[in-house]
Amino acid sequence: MTHSCVSYEWVLLIFFHGILLMSMSSCLKSKTVPALANETDRLALLDFKNRITQDPLQIMSSWNDSVHFCNWLGVTCGPSSKRVMALNLTAKKLSGSIPPSIGNLTYLTGIYLRNNSFYDEIPQEVGRLQRLQLLNLSQNSFGGKLPTNLSYCTQLRVLDVAYNNLVGQIPGHLSSLSKLVNLSLGVNNLIGSIPAWIGNFSSLNVLGLHRNNFQGSIPSELGRLSRLRVLRLSVNNLSGTIPPQIYNISSIYFFSVTYNQLHGSLPSDVGFTLPNLQIFYGSANNFTGPIPKSFSNASQLRSLDLAQNGLIGTVPQNLANLQGLRWLNLGENSLGKGKDGDLSFLNFLANCTSLEYLSLGANNFGGVLPSSIANLSTQLSILVMGENKIHGNIPTGIENLVNLNLLGLENNYLGGTLPHVLGKLQELNILDLRNNIFFGPIPSTLGNLTTLTELYMDGNRFEGRIPPSLGNCQNLLLLNLSHNNLSGTIPKQVMGLSSLSIYLDLSYNFFIGALPFEVGNLVHLTKLDLSKNKILGKIPTTLGTCISLEYLYLGGNSFEGVIPQSLKNLRGLEDIDLSHNKLYGHIPEFLSKLLALKHLNISYNDFEGEVPSEGIFANASAISIFGNEKLCGGVQELNLSSCSSKHPKLNRRLLALRIIIPVTCITIFVLLLLYFFPMCSTVKKLREGALTTSSFEDWQLPISYAELLESTNGFSKNNLIGSGSFGSVYRGVLSRNGAIVAIKVLNLQQQEASTSFINECNALRSIRHRNLLKIFSACSSIDHKGNDFKSLIFEFMCNGSLDQWLHPKNDEQPQRNKLSFIQRLNIAIDVAYALEYLHQHCQTPIVHCDIKPSNILLDEDMVAHVGDFGLVRFLFEASNNPSKTQTLSVGLKGSIGYIPPAWPDWMELK
Ligand SMILES: *[C@@H]1O[C@H](CO)[C@@H](O)[C@H](O)[C@H]1NC(C)=O
Ligand SMILES: *[C@@H]1O[C@H](CO)[C@@H](O)[C@H](O)[C@H]1NC(C)=O
Ligand SMILES: *[C@@H]1O[C@H](CO)[C@@H](O)[C@H](O)[C@H]1NC(C)=O
Ligand SMILES: *[C@@H]1O[C@H](CO)[C@@H](O)[C@H](O)[C@H]1NC(C)=O
Ligand SMILES: *[C@@H]1O[C@H](CO)[C@@H](O)[C@H](O)[C@H]1NC(C)=O
Ligand SMILES: *[C@@H]1O[C@H](CO)[C@@H](O)[C@H](O)[C@H]1NC(C)=O
Ligand SMILES: *[C@@H]1O[C@H](CO)[C@@H](O)[C@H](O)[C@H]1NC(C)=O
Ligand SMILES: *[C@@H]1O[C@H](CO)[C@@H](O)[C@H](O)[C@H]1NC(C)=O
């Protein structure tokens, strides 16, 4: 009994002991193990915090130990596990890199770092996050390759790394991610072909591969993606035809293949097989054949862009069934037969009451411009029909299109007189009527178009006077009335229109009378062409205040008198033509001192005396002086008789004053210089034979994204010459004229970049000076593939920035010598000129706000040019002048007569 009792007690004891032990151990387990785990997460998060290099919003200050990490900003924990499940730092302006310890946060299901400035590679350790379902790293600066270990994250549903700088191919390992719903790799530098195994991702909704360097053909396996809604392949080097299977994915609503080298015709039943289409972008490929009539069956179609292909035939009338159509771009194809009826579809398009954009430019459309264009949607903002064979005249009903921004009818056979109602198109920015057969007067109502920035009426038969009311168009940057039959005097209101900055061309008309002295108001004007008219009298001295002038063409008139001395202020002049006038007197000395001058034509006048031998005159092929019988001297190649030295008698004292003193001074100065700086004998050479800065005509066509893409080899790294907070700068060679340019591509993910762009455009559109970096063009506003693309095209400065000279990096210009004292002095003077111009001579004084060596660029002659106007401030004479503020806040408006295949903002995918 005792024995059994004892043993019973023991059993109990052991039993209870066991329970105690078990409970203790379970207690230990429930305490220590999670404690370790939460410590892992805390350490990993702190490591993440340590890698943050910029945090202007002070997000990371909340990541401190006064609160549990589950309450740190952007951190979400599992309710019971207290482990980190999601990290959401979307759009927090953070910079930094992702540490490998991210792989310790093994409970993570979602990482959202979209729209920050994270850089460096995505660490392989993300492969440890086997519960990860959503990884959004888009809109950052991640580089390197896609980590192959991502293949272990087999639960991934969203992989979005768009808008980064990733390189390399899509790793084959990623074929394991079979649960993907969204695969967005767009806007990187990925290469290789599109893997066929993507076709196995049976849940895929969104496939974004646009704006990379993918090549080869589109794999037909993609046709198996039966749930695909968005297919974005634009801006790659894809070739071949589109596999027919893809057109069978009926769920697609967004289809974009712009800017590839795809060919073949569009299937005739495309609208039936893709009935959900909202957006179809096929522009800038090599598609041929007709536009399928069946598009009209895709009743939700909003946007159809087939520009820049080889399409033929007619435009289907039944497109008019598409009530929601906003964007129809068929430009640059071979549509139409050049005959009547080609445009009859326009009679029906009135049904599309949301139409905002209609481009039919550069096709083969013939026939009469139907008056039914007056019935088009009042929403229409862009109507482009230039470069066709269209007859007839502009119907008065055009006044209904009250929202028109751009009307391009250039290079057609349109005629008749212009309707006065054009003056009612109050939103008009660009009116392009050039090269038609319009006649009659220029309607004075055009003066009501106060928002007009560019007016092209050249190459017609307009007659009568220029209406003085045109002087009311105070936003006009460019006015071309050349090659018409205009006559009378040039109204001073127009001659003094100070907003004109790009050019004023009145050449080849019958203008008479004197040149109004108001010409001096054109302080921003770069090019003035008045040649081949009947203008008489003296060249007004006020012309000397047009300090931005680079091209001055007054040839073929009846100007008389001498060349005014005031023109010596026009230091930026590159090309002067005064030929075939009645000018006389000596050739002014200052012409030989205009260092930018490349051509000078003063032939067929009545000049006399000695031709200078310096400056432009040293190069006989750069000047033309024929037909001036009384000239002598000059360089030998001119073959002029030498001037018999009949110096007027000078008394000795005058001789001493005039010659000896300066000569002595100069000699002493030169000796001093030679003593201190043996290098300075290599005086700045003249700019002859330098890079041919292309004439303005080359820039009349706006630059398209495609052209920039081509010019920079697809924005290749090799052409990258710099990058900064607002974007990157590439070197490009334009195929249109072989010009070497610098292309500044703005990083639009930076909010400030947009502001910077607007500032820069505002600043640059109105100012020109030889010591300011010259802007050739801008590629702006809309870009075809879903993203704003903004860039500025500048003169290329082959000697880089001053900064590079002053503080050379190890591998940078090792061959370059240090700047000599004279060079430094010249640079300082150049910069001073530029600043003086900005502060004193601009209509509104401009403060650059960012003068530093890296913004001072040097051309091949080491002439300094101030650049980077991203931070400029306009100083207003009267800060309470709202109208002026408004004028300046207007961004760059549209482009000229041609709109590239484009993608308006409202289509951006979320
Ligand atoms: C980890 O968990 C233990 C117990 O729940 C807690 O006392 C400790 O404060 C936690 N540590 C952190 C860093 O959250
Ligand atoms: C991540 O975990 C590894 C091992 O699990 C450990 O060695 C490392 O210190 C951890 N990193 C951080 C930052 O906690
Ligand atoms: C720690 O974070 C909390 C908010 O989570 C904040 O109120 C506090 O100021 C922070 N402490 C420090 C020292 O930054
Ligand atoms: C991430 O946080 C932002 C606010 O910062 C919020 O708008 C967004 O919905 C969050 N995303 C997720 C997936 O929780
Ligand atoms: C990115 O984030 C900033 C704020 O940090 C915001 O202003 C901007 O609109 C965001 N951009 C996009 C494209 O989401
Ligand atoms: C487009 O096709 C034409 C002839 O059909 C060919 O000359 C041209 O090179 C092609 N362009 C591209 C980009 O493939
Ligand atoms: C205009 O739209 C209606 C639908 O609202 C359609 O029935 C009609 O056929 C369309 N007209 C033309 C000319 O396409
Ligand atoms: C337009 O201009 C004409 C003449 O220049 C003028 O009579 C008219 O009042 C102006 N305004 C409108 C809205 O047409």
Image: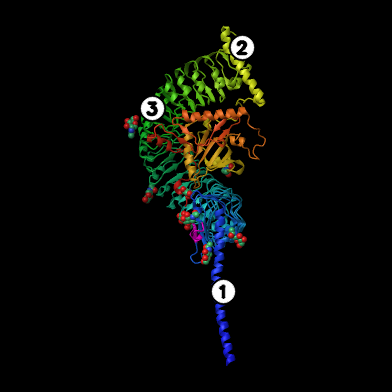
Label whose residue precedes the other's in the sequence (1 or 3)? 1
Residue 570 vertical placement versus 425 (above, below)? above
Q: Please state the horizontal and vertical placement of residue 542, each as a whole percent of the image.
A: 45, 21
Task: Tell which tag, 1 or 2, sits nearer the viewer.
Answer: 1
Query: In 3D space, how far apart are the residues under numbered discs 2 and 3 (Cα atoms)?
Result: 53 Å
The amino acid type of the residue labelled 2 equals Ser
Query: In 3D space, how far apart are the residues under numbered discs 1 and 2 (Cα atoms)?
Result: 116 Å
Marks 2/3 in contact by CB < 8 Å: the verdict is no
Q: Secondary structure at mark 3?
A: loop
Query: In 3D space, how far apart are the residues under numbered discs 1 and 3 (Cα atoms)?
Result: 101 Å
Task: Tell which tag, 1 or 3, sits nearer the viewer.
Answer: 1
Answer few, some or many: residues within 10 Å of disc 3's Cα (few below 14, many 20 plus, some between 14 and 19).
Answer: some
> Residue at point 55% right, 15% down?
627
The amino acid type of the residue labelled 3 equals Pro
Determine which residue is flagged by label 2. 642
Let me know if residue 478 is in the magenta part: no
The number of discs equals 3
Report the span colored magenta: 64-76
Q: Please state the horizontal and vertical placement of residue 493, each as a whole percent of the image.
A: 39, 26
Let me know if residue 72 is in the magenta part: yes
Determine which residue is flagged by label 3. 441
Determine which residue is flagged by label 1. 25
Q: Quadrant of residue 129?
A: bottom right
Marks 1/3 in contact by CB < 8 Å: the verdict is no
